[in-house]
Image (cartoon, grey):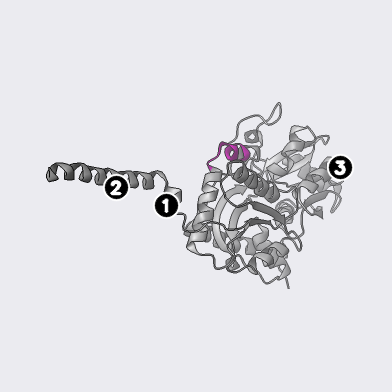
């Protein structure tokens, strides 16, 4: 009888162990949740409202809330002062505080180089690259220009500083591209800085400036409405997105600037960092959160709406990319004469 009773007991123990293993395998997030937020997470944007970084950060926040991806709230905060220096210095001063993340753009490099503000990307902890953002040469749809060459030729005929190029900030990526166009073609613009890409698009629509090199997401609504015309994209190849944005054109129909006689390429980081000294568990938590965000169908649609290059990376690969990008931007800033003296 004893041996008969022992067999069911052994079977029950074996079954219980198997169920525990199955539960662990079925719940990888619970098993590896070594750290998670215990209070609201601040999501810092070192740029103004309405621009590409602002739109992406708020879209991520919306997905996190919609799909209940965090137990704690995520609070978006714009800290755009000093070309983003306000946001970067705020994060630098938050050493050891894991409840803060920041979305970055090229001012991660250009702001400290142009102003001398005591900040470097190395003061933060890299988490993930979300995408690379494109730049497009935009003009008002009422203009006669059909190609980038048409526009540049007219700028040259108009004389130095007659045509106005609107852009986000001074000595930032928009002005870097403008200087590159001038160097490549001999055309000369009056560069007019604004606080964000949303404001820049409005200025082109209102004909207060003649052109911009806005990110796609910053001008797509005005393009769809028929107020703006894209002349070329500053990438080595055309966009992969073939769905029509207007009744006649898709992102893929926009020629590269090289095709249009402007051999200039420039893309901008859309990446996430967290506070200095963050632990591996903190970084792993945010990496996982962003992976789940980027797997959402809404994210895929957002990528297409903004014509993003969907390159993603994290860990050592991401840190190396950022280090290489810093070197590239230093060369660009030195060539443009934008380095702080």
Residue at the disc numbered 3? 207
Q: Nearer the viewer, mark 2 or mark 1?
A: 2
* SS under mark 2: helix
Mark 3 or mark 2, which is nearer the start of the sequence? Answer: 2
Say which mark, if any, is on residue 17: 2
Q: Position of residue 187 (x, y in %)?
A: 78, 51
Identify the residue at image location x=68%, y=59%: 107
| Labels 2 & 1 near each other (Cβ < 8 A) | no
Residue sitting nearer the eye, 232 or 322: 322
Residue sitting nearer the eye, 100 or 191: 100
Q: Badge 1: how crowded within 10 Å, few (<14), some, or many (20+)?
A: few
Q: Is residue 114 above or below residue 158?
A: below
Q: Position of residue 70 (x, y in %)?
A: 57, 49
Say which mark, if any, is on residue 84: none
Residue sitting nearer the eye, 286 or 311: 286
* SS under mark 1: helix
């Amino acid at each position: 009888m004893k041996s008969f009773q022992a067999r069911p007991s052994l079977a029950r123990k074996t079954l219980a162990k198997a169920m525990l293993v199955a539960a662990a395998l079925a719940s990888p997030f619970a098993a590896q949740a070594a750290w998670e937020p215990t209070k609201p997470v601040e999501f810092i944007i070192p740029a103004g409202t309405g621009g590409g970084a602002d739109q992406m950060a708020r879209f991520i926040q919306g997905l996190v809330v919609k799909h209940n991806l965090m137990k704690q709230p995520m609070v978006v905060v714009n800290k755009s002062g000093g070309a983003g220096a306000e946001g970067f210095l705020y994060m630098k001063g938050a050493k050891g505080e894991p409840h803060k993340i920041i979305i970055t753009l090229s001012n991660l490099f250009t702001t400290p180089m142009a102003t001398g503000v005591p900040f470097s990307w190395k003061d933060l902890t890299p988490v993930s690259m979300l995408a690379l953002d494109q730049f497009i040469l935009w003009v008002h749809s009422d203009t006669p220009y059909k190609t980038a060459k048409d526009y540049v030729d007219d700028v040259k005929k108009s004389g130095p500083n007659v045509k106005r190029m609107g852009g986000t900030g001074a000595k930032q990526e928009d002005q870097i591209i403008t200087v590159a166009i001038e160097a490549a073609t001999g055309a000369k613009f009056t560069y007019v800085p604004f606080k964000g890409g949303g404001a820049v698009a409005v200025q082109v629509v209102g004909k207060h400036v003649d052109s911009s090199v806005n990110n796609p997401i910053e001008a797509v609504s005005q393009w769809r409405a028929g107020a703006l015309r894209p002349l070329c994209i500053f990438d080595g190849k055309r966009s992969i997105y073939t769905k029509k944005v207007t009744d006649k054109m898709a992102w893929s129909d926009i020629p590269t600037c090289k095709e249009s006689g402007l051999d200039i390429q420039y893309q901008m980081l859309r990446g996430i960092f967290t506070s200095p000294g963050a632990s591996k568990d903190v970084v792993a938590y945010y990496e996982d959160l962003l992976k789940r965000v980027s797997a959402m169908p809404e994210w895929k649609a957002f990528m297409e709406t903004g014509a993003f290059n969907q390159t993603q990376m994290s860990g050592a690969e991401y840190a190396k990319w950022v280090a290489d990008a810093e070197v590239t931007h230093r060369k660009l800033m030195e060539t443009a004469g934008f380095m702080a003296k």
